[in-house]
Image (cartoon, rainbow, N blue to C red):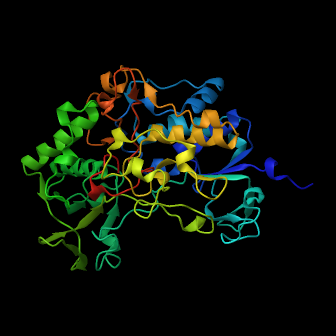
Amino acid sequence: MSTSFDELPVAVIGGGPVGLAAAAHLAEREIPFVVLEAGDGPAAMVRQWGHVRLFSPWRYNVDAAARRLLAEAGWVEPDPDVLPMGAQLADDYLRPLADVPTLKPHIRYDSRVVAVTRLGMDRVRTADRASTPLLVRLADGDDLLARAVIDASGTWATPNVLGASGIPAHGETQAAAYVEHALPDVLGADRDRFAGKRTVVVGAGHSAANTLLALAELAGQAPGTSVVWAIRSTSAARTYGGEAADALPARGALGSRLRSHVDDGTIELVTGFAVQSVEATAGRVRVSGGVGTITADRIVSATGFRPDHTFVSELRLDLDPILGSTRALAPLIDPNEHSCGTVPPHGADELAHPEPGFYAIGVKSYGRAPTFLLATGYEQARSVVAALAGDWAAARDVQLDLPETGVCNSDPVLDSDTITSSGGCCGTTAAAEAEPAGRRRAPLTLISVTETGGSDQAGGCCD
């Protein structure tokens, strides 16, 4: 028996925090769905930065619909004031969520999406698009039909290049064996690659800061370890951030500790450095940036991420020519105008494309803008699912307001005695004081690795 268009499932691409949040909202509204996750388990990308601590406490890292489903399954929520590690986010929240009976049968692992199009038509044909199923092709050749597609695949797999012009620097491809991407486990699994070596970290965001702090700690443990920090800006002030004035102690401490290591010479800071060429020679690597050349054993490229739209190229997308987000969303998230804390609430209307039934949510929706917040992704999921259910009143009721006693007045704690160099990849916005009294924007959670776009060198708040 053939399946009618309205009986087809919604296909969710990605089994990370925002993709599983979308699944939770679809389950609550009893809309058929399938989650397609490229990894062999939920939150596969999160696990790649499992050694990094979030800035924000548990209370801001759990989607509302997910919390309700987990509560029904007997889940014991972690201490809401503790700052979790990435591995804890995956093990203590996302794995149990994926195993909830209403979600588990509908999640397919090892299912990498390679194309999304309309059944029997390319993007040129106009007639009947809204009533023609979307075709989702997997890497194994399997085809699935869907009434709608929610792309929550993130940007972790498509990091930015080292080259300051947005394309690989001269020799960058040939020197790939010397280059690490963002957030290597410097003090753990990857220690041997850095101990006793000279490493240059390129980038000016929180990913760079975390790696620099870990390398500084390693320098105190392993003789011969040295650290160089290269940024395109003429000042590191933006990376240091608010320090003691930051509403989140963990994030403020990150900037303060980084500045301290620069001041005492543990970290050598090179400003005005825009990478132009990379050359491997005699077992080392030379990085040239206009103001000079740095010779090192390893390079950590902490220059941010960008979205991959190639597998949806046969859909009708209205992408901003600069950021790669939807054209409607671009002015709300432009990093030249906004920080994480000043991005206005937005939902299905701003995320819609000319292609009916297709939405990108999570960090991918932000294109190259590094101002994404995890709680924003949760609200995107709620709004988009409401729109797919035909409940446009709920879809347009974007709920990102909290009382004045929100996170800016909280004092989250670690689950250990001190903030270590593994702490501080993610956080919540400290800009609530800019909102009118009695109506402040929600304390949103940054997710600066698996679900973040943009460029560290652009000086974004989450990268």
Q: Is residue 367 left or right of residue 36?
A: left
Residue located 33% across and 22% down the image: 410
* Viewer can see residue 99: no
Picture quadrant where residue 204 is located? bottom left
Residue located 34% across and 47% down the image: 462
> Measured along the vertical axis of the image, is residue 118 above or below residue 151?
below
> Measured along the vertical axis of the image, is residue 23 above or below residue 2?
above
Query: In this view of the protein, which residue sits in the foreground, 111 or 350?
Result: 350
Q: Is residue 348 left or right of residue 143?
A: left
Query: In this view of the protein, which residue sits in the foreground, 33 or 405?
Result: 405
* Coordinates of residue 85 in the picture (x, y in percent): 40, 38
Q: Is residue 3 left or right of residue 278?
A: right
Q: Residue furthest left?
A: 264
* Coordinates of residue 81 in the picture (x, y in percent): 39, 24
- What is the quadrant of the N terminus in the image? bottom right
* Coordinates of residue 95 in the picture (x, y in percent): 57, 39
> Measured along the vertical axis of the image, is residue 433 above or below residue 181?
above
Residue located 43% across and 53% down the image: 330
Query: In this view of the protein, which residue sits in the foreground, 115 or 110?
Result: 115
Picture quadrant where residue 426 is located? top left
